[in-house]
């Protein structure tokens, strides 16, 4: 399998670029490979900062719904890959900067929400369409970005918010034109990379330790509901509707006969 990303290290900055057309939705193997690579980069002596960005139409559309529609039994492994990837960002010994553009959905929210710093292009939009995909998850990481009531409104309605609103809510460090996104994020990364690696690593560990609650424990709680959701007929219908590009139909057989 070709990895759905490429990595380059220079001057203390590891740049990981997600690139899986058409929408950077990663399959089961892709999520585990991503987790492995983020973990590996955090162990490289010459890496003081990790920058994650993407090519294509948007940052990340989350999991590969088509794979899960065809092989729903893979949900357990996909869940594990998501968990590992987000944990690899959040618990990485070095700071992780995420630079987003276009759509930031599902697993893309997890990566951004787990990051230390988020930079966005002015075309970026943030959303969690999980309810409309027959799944759960992402709320813990979304709540690390936005206030609780905003998270619930986004989660229940499936509505997204744009970069300007995300900046107003305090989730984004900078909003810039897409053409300036990489350079802006890289400049922040280089500023951090130039500092004492030992001090930055201590700062990352100490800041993680004073957070309110445990992000990974909260996300693991959510994932249990994803498994419960996948046992329902409605969940299967949402995935089938997504693949067939139609509206989901939740009417019972009795209602359809009326």
Image: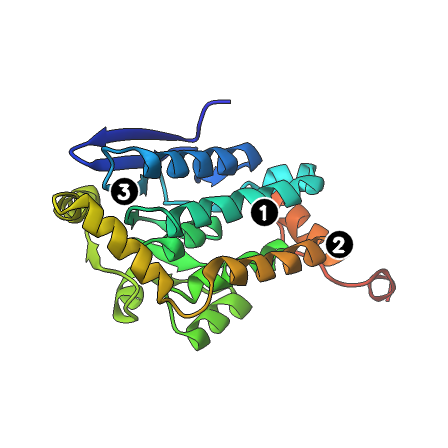
Q: Evaluate whether residue 73 shows in this view.
A: yes
Vertical position of residue 140 compared to residue 6: above or below: below
Q: Earlier in the sequence, mark 1 or mark 2?
A: 1
Quarter of the figure with the C terminus: bottom right
Vertical position of residue 201 compared to residue 146: above or below: above
| Mark 2 or 3, closer to the camera | 3
Q: Quadrant of residue 221?
A: bottom right
Q: Nearer the viewer, residue 158 or 1?
A: 1
Image position of 30 (left or right of 235): left
Residue 41 horizontal/vertical position (percent)? 33, 35
Image position of 174 (left or right of 127): left
At numbered mark 1, what does the secondary structure look like: helix, strand or loop?
A: helix
Circle count: 3
For the point 65% across and 58% down, the residue is: 224
Q: Quadrant of residue 234?
A: bottom right
Distance from Cα at disc 3 to Cα at disc 1? 23 Å
Distance from Cα at disc 1 to Cα at disc 2? 15 Å
Q: Residues within 10 Å of mark 2 (few under 14, many from 20)?
A: few
The residue labelled by disc 1 is 79
Distance from Cα at disc 2 to Cα at disc 3? 37 Å
Q: Evaluate whether residue 122 shows in this view.
A: no
Circles 3 and 1, Cβ within 8 Å, touching? The answer is: no
Residue 128 horizontal/vertical position (percent)? 49, 59
The residue labelled by disc 3 is 51
The residue labelled by disc 2 is 231
Vertical position of residue 144 compared to residue 178: above or below: below
């Amino acid at each position: 399998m070709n990895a759905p990303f490429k990595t380059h290290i220079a001057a203390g900055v590891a740049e990981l670029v997600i690139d899986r057309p058409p929408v950077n939705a990663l399959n089961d193997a892709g999520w585990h490979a991503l987790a492995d690579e983020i973990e590996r980069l955090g162990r490289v002596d010459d890496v003081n900062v990790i920058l994650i960005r993407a090519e294509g139409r948007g940052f990340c559309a989350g999991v590969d719904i088509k794979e899960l529609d065809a092989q729903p039994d893979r949900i357990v492994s996909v869940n594990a890959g998501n968990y590992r990837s987000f944990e690899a960002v959040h618990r990485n010994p070095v700071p992780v900067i995420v630079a987003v553009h276009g759509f930031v959905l599902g697993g893309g929210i997890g990566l951004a929400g787990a990051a230390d710093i988020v930079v966005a292009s002015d075309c970026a939009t943030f959303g969690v369409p999980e309810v409309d995909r027959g799944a759960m998850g992402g709320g813990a990481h979304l709540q690390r970005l936005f206030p609780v009531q905003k998270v619930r409104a986004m989660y229940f309605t499936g509505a997204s918010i744009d970069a300007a609103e995300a900046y107003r809510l305090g989730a984004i460090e900078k909003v810039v034109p897409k053409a300036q996104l990489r350079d802006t994020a890289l400049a922040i990364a280089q500023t951090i990379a130039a500092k004492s690696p030992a001090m930055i690593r201590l700062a990352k560990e100490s800041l993680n330790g004073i957070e309110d609650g445990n992000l990974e424990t909260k996300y693991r709680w959510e994932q249990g509901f994803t498994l419960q959701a996948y046992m329902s007929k409605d969940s299967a219908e949402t995935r089938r509707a997504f693949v067939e590009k139609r509206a989901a139909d939740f009417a019972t057989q009795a209602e359809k006969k009326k």
